[in-house]
């Protein structure tokens, strides 16, 4: 039996905070792991993340303005740099040590801004997930963000168990064989791996559009989840019996799940492909199809959360297809326990 929700967060980890293109000279307020944060980009391109509270009178810094590489509070004009250090207090020369805004490490990589919400001294950029597909010349991508009104663990369940695509996504990525095909589920190197291979199967409506398939295909789904929120789906297809990847399509559906609150979560998603490079029409088509697909998920997951809220204490029933789900929940629980046991 699986618990309904996970209501604690791994703090010492990198989380996707925003797409890099979202960070401009207009302060961006965002709630992440239950904390109010303001994100911004300075004139030199440097990016910053501060607690969205001015230490002077606790006004939201997101209501201020970016000046150079600094952020000026819109209430009394205190000026803070990207590290939260106060650079100026209008009307006085001395700057007291307490005039400091809390700072969060923020790193730009793979077209995203990654934030560290735990101990700043432990923020090693080498721990950022390796999403090289998003910057590699042999791959192209569509990407976006969808916000769900549910607990983030429910989206982990949804993405690790793709048997639901047969029923939820009939018009895009679902086929009858997905729910019927046995899966391999196991732990590998601190992650959960789930694999499903389908042979001599009908291509989904999306695969027909993307790959131009007219007959049956051999299709695979290889899903890797690394807590707290890193999800990568290696998915593709080739003409049935060909065994030649050059005749088919290879894709990576990449996602990071960043909780906003216990019952809301940002899903930063990207669909990387090794075909139709530079084709804006294909990029737009894929983005449209992914938006449709994830909004179908959203309707169910948001409804699932409403039912959970209405029936506190009830546990979820597990079946054979939930083998990966159970492994993910256990691994996340272990990561949470380790983070809380050794916060320093």
Image (spheres, rainbow, N blue to C red):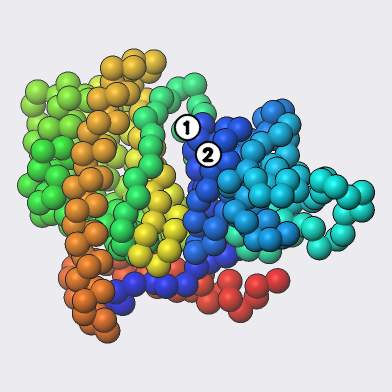
Image coordinates of residue 209 in percent, x first then y, are 17, 25
Earlier-in-chain disc, 1 versus 2: 2
Helix, strand or loop at label 1? It is helix
Query: Is 73 left or right of 272, judged from the image as shown?
Result: right
Residue occupied by mark 1? 134
Image point (39%, 56%), residue name: 265
Image point (32%, 54%), residue name: 148
Image coordinates of residue 241 in percent, x first then y, are 16, 31
Residue occupied by mark 2? 112
Check contact, mark 1 vs mark 2: CB within 8 A.
yes
Residue 240 in view, yes or no: no
Question: Considering the image in quadrants, where does the N terminus appear?
Answer: bottom left
Image point (51%, 31%), residue name: 21
> Which of label 1 and label 2 is nearer to you?
2
Query: Is 237 left or right of 227, judged from the image as shown?
Result: left
Residue 215 in view, yes or no: yes
Query: Is 300 left or right of 76, judged from the image as shown?
Result: left
What whole-number distance in Å separates the C-alpha atoms at marks 1 and 2?
10 Å
Query: Is 335 left or right of 122, judged from the image as shown?
Result: left
């Amino acid at each position: 039996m699986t618990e309904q929700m996970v209501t604690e967060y791994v703090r010492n980890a990198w989380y996707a905070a925003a797409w890099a293109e979202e960070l401009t000279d207009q302060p961006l307020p965002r709630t992440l792991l239950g904390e109010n944060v303001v994100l911004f980009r300075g004139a030199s391109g440097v990016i910053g993340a501060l607690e969205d509270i001015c230490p002077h009178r606790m006004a939201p810094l997101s209501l201020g303005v970016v000046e150079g590489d600094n952020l000026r509070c819109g209430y009394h004009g205190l000026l803070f740099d990207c590290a939260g250090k106060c650079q100026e207090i209008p009307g006085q020369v001395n700057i007291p040590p307490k005039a400091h805004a809390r700072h969060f490490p923020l790193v730009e990589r793979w077209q995203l801004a990654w934030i560290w919400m735990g101990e700043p001294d432990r923020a090693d950029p080498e721990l950022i997930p390796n999403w090289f597909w998003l910057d590699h010349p042999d791959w192209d991508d569509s990407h976006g963000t969808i916000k769900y009104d549910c607990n983030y663990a429910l989206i982990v369940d949804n993405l690790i168990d793709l048997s639901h695509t047969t029923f939820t996504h009939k018009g895009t990525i679902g086929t009858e064989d997905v729910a019927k095909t046995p899966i391999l589920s196991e732990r590998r190197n601190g992650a959960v791996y789930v694999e499903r291979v389908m042979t001599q199967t009908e291509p989904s409506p999306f695969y027909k559009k993307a790959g131009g398939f007219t007959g049956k295909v051999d299709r695979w789904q290889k899903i890797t989840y690394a807590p707290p929120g890193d999800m990568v789906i290696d998915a593709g297809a080739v003409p049935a019996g060909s065994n030649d990847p050059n005749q088919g399509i290879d894709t990576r559906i990449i996602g990071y799940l960043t909780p906003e609150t216990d019952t809301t979560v940002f899903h930063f998603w990207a669909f990387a492909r090794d075909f139709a490079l530079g084709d804006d029409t294909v990029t737009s088509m894929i983005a449209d199809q992914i938006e449709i697909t994830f909004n179908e998920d959203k309707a169910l997951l948001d409804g699932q959360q409403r039912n959970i809220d209405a029936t506190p204490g009830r546990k979820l029933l597990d079946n054979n297809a939930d083998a990966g789900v159970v492994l993910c929940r256990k691994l996340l629980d272990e990561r949470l326990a380790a983070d809380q046991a050794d916060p320093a």
